Image (cartoon, rainbow, N blue to C red):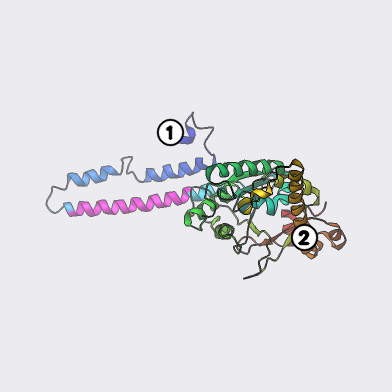
Amino acid sequence: MLLADHPETKKKVDPRMHSAEHILTATLMKMSSCGRPFTTHIEKKKSKADQPGSYCNAVQETLRNLMRTSIILTHALATVVLTAAAAAPAASEGGKLRIICFGAHPDDCEIQAGGVGAMWAAKGHKVKLVSVTNGDIGHWRDAGGPLAKRRKAEVERADEMLGVTAEVLDIHDGELLPTIENRRLITRLIREWNADIVMSPRPNDYHPDHRYTGVLVQDAAYMVTVPFFCPDVPCLKRNPVFLYYPDSFQKPNPFQPDVAVAIDSVIDKRLDALDALESQFYEGGANGSPELIPADPAKQLERKRQVRAGFQKRYANLAQRFRAKLGEFYGPDQAQKIQYAEAFEVCEYGRRPDKEELKKLFPFFGE
């Protein structure tokens, strides 16, 4: 009986694996002769081994059969993987986009893409924000497991406000490396989300975790489509669009926006979400100090207002910096009225969308 036909599992088995299992079963049946197991041929050779001069022939025939078996099994595995991949659901079923954003720490995605993330989510698109490390050294006072738990709780609360999904990987802060294991990890996450859009930092940044997050996502940009890389997760049928967050670094090359989006409609929501990340902004994160946490309630309120105003100014500066790009998508008159913005650059290693496709991926310009 096939696993997919078993009464205990029939409703739980992924239907796209049903046909793949049939392929593997049929292939294994080819390895029998007239219904007899392949091992019977080996036993026959053993039984004749006591005849003069026949032992070496028996061993050679057995080795040939084993080689044929290996080839058949390899072909079967290839067919199973390709069948499962071909049956994988389309990334944009129902016309809804699937976006996955990567940041090095439990606040990076929220800073860089919280506005468009909230706007996509409001339209019913599926958005996941992934922190590649757990942030367990990102505070001047606290560290280790307690800080990791605190930051995870903070970012989950922030992402709930934005209407998006949060995930924090359990990799130590400050220790991220572009290993093959981490490349597989990022590739699997992108495939499992069936992403249309993947976002990350550029691989030139002051923080090694930021740099290596960018490298890892870049390295996954083609591999997500390769069937035999991480064959346990069906590959994507086509490469997603990979996008970079903005930064101010000039060497070896400056950030060049391909799309800019007004976030005026969600500015309060995204600022509220950032307010939830108290350990990083209100308390100052790794470079903070006790002086940032006044005992006087009035001064505490003033401190929170300063943090909020700082982020508000950040997004106002982005709108001013990328005013020309906003004009390309909204028109010059409307672009001048935009107060807050986010911008993104297309990574050349993913699919390269033209302006019309960018408008479909960012369905906000007619509003």
In this rendering, the count of numbered labels is 2
Percent position (x, y) of residue 172? Answer: 52, 50
Percent position (x, y) of residue 311? Answer: 74, 53
Q: Is residue 123 visible?
A: no
Q: Residue furthest bottom?
A: 252
Categorize mark 1 by other alpha carbons within 10 Å: few (<14), some (14-19), many (20+).
few
> Which secondary structure lies at badge 2?
helix
Percent position (x, y) of residue 93? Answer: 66, 45
Q: Is residue 284 visible?
A: yes
Q: Residue at x 67, y 58 (%)?
A: 245
> Which secondary structure lies at badge 1?
loop
In the image, the segment drawn in magenta is 56-80
Q: Which residue is mark 1?
A: 1
Q: Nearer the viewer, residue 201 or 69?
A: 201
Q: Residue at x 55, y 41 (%)?
A: 146
Identity of the amino acid at label 1?
Met
Q: Which residue is mark 2?
A: 317
